Structure formats: C-alpha cells, structure tokens
Image (tube, rainbow, N blue to C red):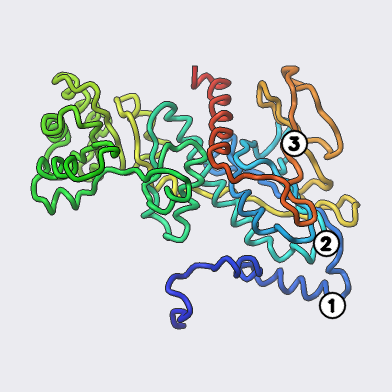
Amino acid sequence: MRFPRDREFLISKEDEIKKGLTTDIYFIRTEKILRSIGKLDTNVKMEISSGGLPKGFGWGVLAGVPEVLNLFKDMEMDLYMMREGTIFKPRDDNGYRTPIGYLVGKYGVFGKYETPLLGLLCQASGIATYSAHIRLAAWGKVLLSFGARRMHPAITPLIDYAAYIAGFDGVSAILSAELLGLEPQGTMPHALILIVGDQVKAWKAFDKYVERNVKRIALIDTLYDEKTEAIMAAEALGENLFGVRIDTPKSRRGDIKEIIKEIRWELDLRGYKNVKIIVSGGVNLDNIKDMIEAGADGFGVGTSVSNAPTVDYALDIVEIEDKPIAKRGKLSGMKQVYRCKKCYYYRITKFQDTLKKCPRCGGEMEPLIHKVIERGRVLVDYSNIEETREYVLSQIEHIGKLEGIIE
C-alpha cells in the first residue's frame, strides 16, 4: 500500500462524507440487496439512542446535531432530534432506554449514512459530556481547551467546539477560535524560555512584545523550583502579571496540591494575592477538585478532553410501514422524552402522548424531541454557538444546584 497521492492528509473530504463513502460496506451491500428485491423504498422509523454513558456518568450532553443537519439537509426525509446541547440521561427514571432522535422516511434515502451519522454524534457528545462534567467540578474557575495537539489536526475545531459549548471559557488553537468567534488564548511554551536562556528575560520579552490585550501569564517550571520562579515572575512583571502557570512534568511533580499551596502562600505573603495560579498538564476529573481546594484558579485541559471516551449511540429500526417492530433488546415504536423543568425527572412516553405534570414533584414537563428536518428542509437554526453554550451552562448549573454542588 502506498500513501494516497491525491491528498496530503488522511482525512475525509466533505463531499465524500455526503456521498456516503465513509460508511461501512455492509450498508452498501444491504442497499444493493433491497433494491434488487424491490424493498429499498420501505418506510421506516429509526431511533438514535444510547443505553449507557462512559465513566459511569449519570448524564450526558448531546452534541453534533448541526453537522447531522448538514448531512441530511435536502434529502427526502424527516428528522427528529433533541436540541443541540441538551443534557440527557441514557435511561429515564423508570429504566427505559432514552431516544435522542429519529430518522423517518424511505430506508434507501438514509440507510447508508448510519456510520457517519453516529460518528458525528458519538465523538462530539463524548467530548461535550466530559467537558461538562469538568465544568461542573470546576464551577467558577477558568477552563481553557488545550487539546489540539493530542488529536489529528483535522478535528481540532470539533474538539474545541464541543468543549466550548460545554462550558469551557476559551481555546488555544487559532482556527478553532476563529470559527467560534473568539480570541485564541494561551501563555508561552518552555521553548521560549529555553531559547532566550533566562526566564526573567523571557517573561519581560513577552510583556514587551505581545499585544496588551493578552493576559500576562508566566510559565514558572522551566529551570527552577515552581515557588521560586513564581516569586521571580511576580517581582519581574509586577502589576502586569495576571497569573503564573504550572506545567510540571510527572517526574518532578511530587504532590501537585502541595506545590500549588506553596505558590499561593509565597505570593500572598509578598502582596501578590491578585496573581492567579493556572495549572496544565494531566488535568482531569480525578484530580481537578483537589487542585481547586489547594488554590488553583484555572486550568488548561488537554488530553482528558480531546481523548474523552465517545458516547456510544446506536441506530435501530423501531417501525416499518407504521407498524412497531424492533430487534431484541430494543423497544419498538417512536417515543418522546419528557423532562421536568424543576427536578430533572425524565420519563419516556409514546410519541403522541402528552405529559404535563411531573410524577415526582408536580413541576412542568417539557418534551425534548422535536422535528428539525421536514422533507429535507431544515427547520431549526443552531448557528448561534453562544446560545447553545448558554443553554448547556444553564442545565449544568441547574444540576449543580439540585446536587448541592452549586449554591
């Protein structure tokens, strides 16, 4: 096998995805068989659902819907989905598997797109879900997406988009920031300090030559002890210094909590209480709370977000020619998901049923699945990324208050 000559990077082109070339071959063979026996135009309803979430999460964030809309627009079919950014449970409070959407129409129209459909949703939802749980754990703290270097650059915008709508405050990658309408955020690499040859000279050069709207955050673990360099940075930049960043390698970390506490103490003792402590490198859900308790003010999160486990959605037939039918292990028939606006109780019903009052608290129930494409015409607009982000954040905050995490 030789590297393909018609492309420099191993990525799918947009038209290749739209043509169904990224699908699994058995869907193309199925299409051929159904066409041969005259059943390719069979009317079906296919359900998108997830029976469980990674890492034992009790709730997830649906992401990737705008790309799904672009995949299916102009096709002779209907699509029902939860809103982009909706927080859902994999099973309702009665234990029934939760649908997040439906494809409705002739199987031959959309059958071969099962693979890209799930791919668009699974990875985006996985990153958004993990990011949202990080956001809840670090409520009120600065979160920056530093995950671009850990994944193929072709999906950098996807990674940063999913993290941002799930509550991250900013991203470091230039293209991602441009597409999100943000200013890229970041500090400095160790390379700057090593090439300059002196950390104080490097910090001062950064302060002198970088645009004034960029926060002055000094990297403090290149040559000396973190505590020592924190003091040096504060004395060198004075009131211009916004914060210091720890990116200490594992071989030198020891107890990162104690390092953070020492830095905070020494800075406060010298009158630099305004200087923030930012931590990057190895930040994840398992250690972020401890670092917050130690005094960390913000985090650059990379691998744990960009490498977040996917949400494993499935696509299954639940009706054929308006008659309920499903494979073993799945429930037939089209369904609706109701969520209580007050206590976030979830209940699955038949799609045509109405549930107005919460069986648990009496609060107002709202349906979460809505028609988003009708005969190829897109009915919704999710282009306002800030609206989606605020929607996700409002749900995270509501959960945090229900669980006593946020006051």
* Between 244 and 249, the one nearer to me in the picture: 244
Which amino acid does the dot numbered 1 rest on?
Ser
Q: What is the distance, in whole Å, between disc 3 and disc 2 at their CAs?
A: 24 Å
Name which quarter of the figure residue 108 lies in: bottom right
Element type where label 1 sits in the image? helix
Q: Residues within 10 Å of mark 2 (few under 14, many from 20)?
A: many
Q: Could you tell me which residue is drawn at 22 percent across and 25 percent down?
A: 264
**Residue 327 appears in the figure:** no
Which amino acid does the dot numbered 2 rest on?
Lys
Name which quarter of the figure residue 67 lies in: bottom right
Which residue is labeled 3 in the image?
337
Q: What is the distance, in whole Å, between disc 2 and disc 1 at their CAs?
A: 15 Å
Lower position in the chain sequence, tag 3 or tag 1: 1
Lower position in the chain sequence, tag 2 or tag 1: 1
How many numbered discs sit on the rendered protein? 3
Which amino acid does the dot numbered 3 rest on?
Val
